[in-house]
Amino acid sequence: MTKQQKLYGISQLCDLKQADIQSHLADWSIMSRLLLEPNKMSINGSEQAFDAQELQQVVEHLGMEEDFWLQLKNTDEETTIHLVGETLFEKSIILEKTFHYWENVYLDYLKARLIKHGLFAYLRSYDEYLYHNTSELEKRRSLESMEETQALPKMRGLNGDIMVDCNKFPGYDVFYKGVCLTSCWWLFLGEAYKKLFAKPLLLEVQQVEQVGELGGGVFFELYKDPFQWHEEANLRFQQLFRDQLGISQLSYTNGIGLLKQPYIEFAFEDTVVQTVQYQNEQFQPTEKNRASYFVTRTYNFLTNQYRVNRMKGGLNALAYFPWIDDESERMMNYHILYPELTLDKGLAAFEYYIRDSIEFKIQDAQYKDYTAVLQLFIPKKAFLDFPLEELKVALNDMTIHQISRKNDSLTFSLEKEAKHLVVSFIDQKKVSAKNQLDILEI
C-alpha cells in the first residue's frame, strides 16, 4: 500500500449570514496560507499562480447566493472551500508533518467554526479514508496487492460490475436522510443529527479517547494518533463506534446489510426517535443476542423531550418479530433485500435472516404457540434465478416442507427442533401497496 501520510479533513457549515461568510472565508484564507504556503490557486476551476492580493479581493466580494469555490495548493497539499448559498463546504489534504506542526492551531480553528454553524466535520488519515472508501478493483492497486484485494468481501455495483463491499469497513462513508454517517479519528456531528441520535446517546458512547459537547453538537476522538489507524486496537475502536451508533442498521449500499447482530436498533415515527441499545453485564455495548441489559431511549427532536430506561432481562419474541397479530396468533418480521447486488444471488443473506428468526429462545410463553412469519421482499426478477436448491443445502439441519412457488412469491415452512417458521419471499412491488401491519395479510 502506498503510504500517503496525509491528513484528510472536511467540514460543513450551514445557516450562514453575509457577515458569517465573510468572516469564515477570511479565516480560511489565513489558515490555508499558514498550512500550505501555496504556490497555485484555482477560482471556480481556473488555475493560476498564487496571488495573495487577488485572493483577498475575491474573498471580500463573495455574495450570499453564489455557487463559488476556491482552492489553494502546493506540490503535495491542497485546501478547498465551496460556497453554496448559506452553506460552506471545506476540504483539506495536508502532510503529516504540517498537521503536527500546526495541530493545536488547526484544531482550535476548526472547533471555533463548528461551535455556531457546524453541521458535520471529520479529520482522518488520508490512507484510512482511501482504504475504507475505494470500491473499484483497479483503484485499489495503489492501496494493496491484487491478492489482498481478492480476499476482501465483494458485491455488484448498479451497473453489474464486481467491486469491493466497503460496507464491511469501519471507516466507510454512507448517507442517510441527507447526512453523512461514518467512523474515523476525529468526528463532529452537529445539531441536525438529533433527528437520528439523542445527544445523551452520543455523549455516552463508550471506548473512545474523547467525547464532548461542541456548540449544538458533539465531537469524538476515537484514538490518539490518526496516522496509526491501521493498528488492530484502533480498528476495533473504529468498528465499535460504528456499531454503537448503528450506522450499518441505518444505511447500507450492498442490498442485504452486514449480516451480523446489531448493537442498537431504531424506530422512527414523525418527530420521535426510539432506540434500544444492547449491553452486557458490565454495561458495555454488545451484540443483540448477547445482551443482558436493554437501554431504551425515546427522544422527540422537535420538543427535546427525552426519556431513558435500562432494564435487565432477556430477548422476547418482539425483539425478533415486532408485528404481532393476536387475533390470528401470528407474529411477523420482514426485510427488503436486493440480491442482485450480491455474488451469490442473495444466498448468504437468506440463510442469515432465516437462522436469525428461528435460532433463538423465546422466553415469553405468551407467544410460544403463535405462528412465526418471516417475509423477505425481493425484486420480481430475482425469482427467475432463485437459489432454492442451494438454500435447501444451506438449511440442511432444518426440515423444509409445504413449498409453494408462484411467479412473484415463494413460501415454505421450516422446522428445527421444536421451532417453526414460515418464510415468504415476495415481490417488492407489493410492499409499497401495504402498510407494515397489512403485510401480515399478504
Image (cartoon, grey):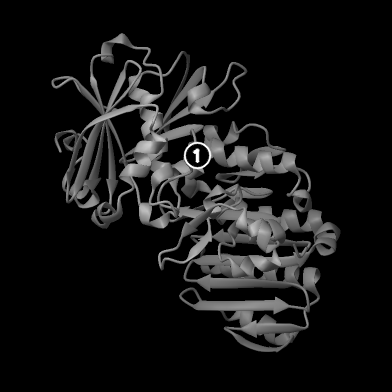
Q: Residue at position x 22%, y 45% from top? A: 426
Residue 395 visible: yes
Q: Is residue 157 above or below residue 199?
A: below
Instruction: Using residue 51 as the reference point, say whether residue 434 is left or right of it.
Output: left
Instruction: Using residue 95 as the reference point, say whether residue 365 is left or right of it.
Output: left
Q: Position of residue 80 (x, y in %)?
A: 64, 72
- The quadrant in which the N terminus is found is bottom right
Q: Residue at position x 39%, y 37% from top? A: 393
Report the amino acid beneath label 1: Gly
Q: Position of residue 69 (x, y in %)?
A: 57, 77
Q: Position of residue 68 (x, y in %)?
A: 54, 78
Q: Mark 1 points at which residue?
A: 246
- The quadrant in which the C terminus is found is top left
Q: Is residue 319 above or below residue 340?
A: above
Determine crowd level at label 1: few under 14, some 14-19, many 20+ residues with C-alpha closer than 10 A.
some
Q: Where is residue 359 in the image (x, y as percent from the top left)?
A: 40, 24
